[in-house]
Image (tube, helix red, strand yellow):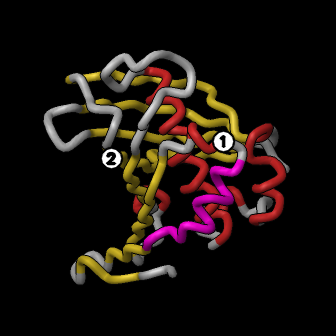
């Protein structure tokens, strides 16, 4: 069940939980053992600026999908975790028509074009301290968005941290092709 609450009266920040069924639909392209995003929350302010559309998530990697356990979060896990929180953010924004530059999408075209039309043009990630991949949290948001005749460029950020001192940050530029 979707829950929305106002968490900051001064800035009118609204927070809503992403429903499990919706999360499952977005993560459907992933093998079950590769679905690292377990819960997600979306927040936005009343000003509807694209920078105020923020997704947070709780992640867990019980077992790596590609390698023996390294004991820590690494670049491959960053990329997979980024993809998952990014897809959920985009799907939520498209479903609720929150990003005018993506108005040529509806949720049905997103499901159809999610994998072939959302491209990573540039990815930079860094690791400030070793992070526990068994349980961690992420925050995803948009810096800027620019629509051209050929695609929409979305400059994003995505940060991860664990319950200890583990921390990873990154910036990713997406190129989203028209449907």
Disc 1: which residue: 30
Which residue is at 55% across, 27% downward? 65
For the residue pair 12 and 21, the one nearer the viewer reads as 21
Question: Which residue is rendered at x = 19% and y = 43% of the image?
Answer: 163
Q: Is residue 91 magenta?
A: no
User: Disc 2 on helix, strand or loop?
Assistant: strand
Indicate which disc, 2 or 1, sits on the residue closer to the N terminus: 1
Q: Give the magenta-colored segment's residue range.
A: 17-28
- Residue 59 lies, with reference to residue 88, above or below; the image says above
Horizontal placement of 15 versus 29: left or right?
left
Circle 1 residues within 10 Å: few <14, some 14–19, many ≥20: few
Q: Is residue 151 visible?
A: no
Q: Along the horizontal axis of the image, is 159 left or right of 110?
A: left
Q: Which mark is residue 137?
A: 2
Q: Splitting the image into 4 quarters, where does residue 62 fall? A: top left
> Which residue is located at x 51 percent, y 29 percent?
79
Q: Is residue 89 above or below residue 64?
A: below
Q: Is residue 153 left or right of residue 156?
A: right
Q: Position of residue 154 (x, y in %)?
A: 58, 42
On the image, the x and y values in percent for residue 57 come to 40, 53
Disc on res. 107: none
Tell me the element at label 1.
Answer: loop
Residue 103 higher or lower than 120, as above or below: below
């Amino acid at each position: 069940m979707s829950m929305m609450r106002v968490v900051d009266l001064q800035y009118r920040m609204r927070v809503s939980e992403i429903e499990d069924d919706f999360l499952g639909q977005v993560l459907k392209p992933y093998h079950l053992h590769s679905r690292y995003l377990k819960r997600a929350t979306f927040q936005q302010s009343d000003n509807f600026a694209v920078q105020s559309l923020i997704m947070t998530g709780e992640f867990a990697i019980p077992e790596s999908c590609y390698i023996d356990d390294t004991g820590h979060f690494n670049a491959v896990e960053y990329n997979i975790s980024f993809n998952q929180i990014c897809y959920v953010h985009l799907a939520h924004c498209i479903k609720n028509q929150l990003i005018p530059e993506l108005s040529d999408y509806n949720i049905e075209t997103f499901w159809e074009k999610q994998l072939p039309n959302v491209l990573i043009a540039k990815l930079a990630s860094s690791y400030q301290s070793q992070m526990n991949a068994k349980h961690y949290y992420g925050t995803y948001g948009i810096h800027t968005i620019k629509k051209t005749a050929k695609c929409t460029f979305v400059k994003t950020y995505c940060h991860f941290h664990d319950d200890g001192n583990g921390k990873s940050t990154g910036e990713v530029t997406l190129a989203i092709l028209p449907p």
